[in-house]
């Protein structure tokens, strides 16, 4: 859209423009900051709430809206407008007349005035029967049908909890850098600034923030006192065997959460971070610099993990494998719109190719830690069943029973308790 034209749009029209881009396949993480940078500070919080809230409830709003459209209309802008309008009416305290007026004006500004009467009529229908439409939205599962079916098949006993959690946001979690400060001392600093926080229960470095804050304004941000990382993701550092003076590869390393965690806890002989995205690898460097971690024995390589070979065998490979990211939907609600069922089969095949390339590069007695942020068994335990069938020189190292759900191999964490996200871990030792 023309920049000058964009500046004349009201806030709802700008949100709709973003929602349409996501429907067309753009990622929220690559688009959101660009939009927020063009919006006055006073409107940023509302933009963020309405955009992410609409994405979180997208499929529930869709299920409620579709019966109200008598003739199906295939238009992404129209659907984004209706869902945004209905989200405001159900989930915010914005007065109904203001939400409807602003949303109708938005679709006119987007040069789709032919739909303004339809949008107005459907949103006003809510005001006549608010309880009925609110109930319809809240009772819907808010997931694409293919994902709902997979979760029902994979986790029938947890289905209600999963569908409820995957339509919510999640807490901001910090990982304290023990080379800079203790967790208890940092909690004290937060309390001195009236920032409500609590200790994580599973990770020794986790702190939960109880309210939304500006991360960069937190004490010690520039000094490298902490990183932002989900508590379940932080378990990687506690699972690892002692890798002091060992050779370690962090495969698919960007943006560097696990790389920096290793350097906070251990002193490897050499740590090699591999990723095929040059731009995302820049984040690894930036994070290392802010956290002021030792880079003397650290190397970054931009390459493809399906083919890259190290020049010597290694003691440990951490493979945070490409996956559907269905375990982190609370933080990235656009995943619901971006993922397709055909993606899962492709991802499983890609994971297999990476495993086949990396496993031979581990020394006998060395380890591979397989990780995903998925809650789909095809990418997790099923992948590991296939791996162990093919590799008789692999032995599973059992993980602590204090967290997660034991699988045939590995342990699965689900996003069902409003704490950490969905992660899968399997630690494998090469025995011959």
Image (spheres, rainbow, N blue to C red):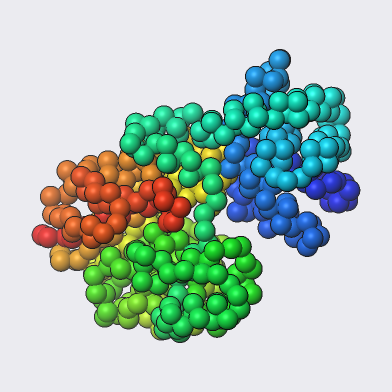
Instruction: Give the image location of residue 141, x and y in percent.
Output: 51, 33
- Please state if 425 lies on the left or on the right of 121 as rendered: left
The image quadrant of residue 242 is bottom left
Q: Is residue 231 visible?
A: yes
Could you say where residue 422 lies in the image, as x and y percent from the top left? 40, 50
Counting labels gives 0
Left or right for 404, reference 175: left
Q: Name the image quarter holding the C terminus.
A: bottom left
What residue lies at 76% left-to-right and 30% top-to-bottom? 127
Please say if 418 is above or below 16: below
Is residue 346 something one can see in this rendering?
no
Picture layout, residue 14 above or below residue 260: above
User: Against 78, is 375 above or below?
Assistant: below
The residue most toward the top is 71
Q: Residue at left 76%, top 45%?
A: 94
Q: Position of residue 24 (x, y in %)?
A: 64, 37
The residue lying at 61 percent from left, 78 percent from top is 193
Position of 195 with respect to 255 (left or right) is: right
- Quarter of the image where the N terminus is located: top right
The single residue placed furthest to the left in the displayed view is 432
In which quarter of the view is residue 89 placed?
top right
């Amino acid at each position: 859209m023309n920049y000058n034209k964009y500046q004349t749009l009201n806030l709802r029209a700008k949100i709709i423009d973003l929602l349409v881009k996501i429907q067309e396949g753009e990622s929220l993480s690559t688009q959101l900051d660009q939009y927020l940078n063009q919006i006055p500070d006073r409107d940023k919080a509302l933009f963020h709430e309405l955009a992410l809230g609409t994405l979180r409830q997208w499929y529930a709003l869709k299920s409620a809206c579709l019966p109200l459209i008598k003739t199906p209309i295939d238009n992404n802008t129209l659907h984004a407008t209706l869902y945004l309008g209905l989200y405001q009416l159900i989930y915010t305290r914005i007065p109904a007349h203001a939400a409807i007026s602003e949303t109708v004006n938005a679709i006119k500004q987007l040069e789709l005035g032919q739909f303004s009467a339809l949008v107005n009529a459907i949103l006003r229908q809510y005001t006549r029967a608010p309880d009925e439409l609110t109930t319809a939205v809240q009772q819907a599962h808010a997931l694409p049908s293919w994902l709902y079916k997979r979760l029902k098949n994979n986790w029938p006993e947890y289905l209600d909890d999963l569908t409820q959690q995957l339509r919510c946001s999640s807490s901001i979690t910090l990982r304290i850098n023990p080379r800079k400060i203790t967790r208890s001392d940092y909690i004290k600093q937060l309390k001195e600034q009236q920032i409500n926080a609590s200790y994580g229960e599973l990770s020794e470095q986790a702190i939960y923030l109880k309210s939304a804050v500006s991360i960069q304004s937190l004490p010690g941000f520039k000094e490298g006192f902490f990183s932002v990382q989900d508590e379940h993701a932080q378990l990687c550092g506690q699972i690892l065997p002692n890798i002091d003076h060992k050779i370690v590869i962090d495969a698919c390393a960007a943006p560097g959460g696990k790389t920096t965690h290793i350097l906070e806890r251990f002193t490897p002989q050499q740590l090699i971070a591999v990723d095929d995205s040059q731009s995302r690898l820049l984040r690894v460097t930036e994070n290392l610099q802010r956290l002021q971690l030792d880079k003397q024995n650290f190397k970054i390589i931009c390459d493809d993990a399906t083919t890259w070979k190290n020049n010597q065998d290694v003691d440990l490979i951490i493979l945070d494998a490409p996956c559907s990211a269905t375990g982190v939907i609370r933080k990235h609600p656009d995943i619901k719109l971006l993922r397709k069922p055909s993606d899962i089969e492709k991802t499983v095949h890609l994971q297999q190719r990476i495993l086949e390339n990396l496993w031979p590069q581990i020394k006998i007695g060395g380890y591979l830690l397989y990780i995903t942020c998925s809650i789909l068994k095809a990418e997790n335990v099923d992948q590991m069943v296939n791996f162990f069938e093919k590799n008789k020189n692999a032995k599973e190292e059992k993980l602590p029973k204090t967290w997660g759900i034991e699988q045939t191999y590995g342990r699965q964490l689900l996003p069902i308790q409003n704490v950490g996200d969905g992660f899968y871990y399997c630690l494998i030792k090469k025995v011959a």
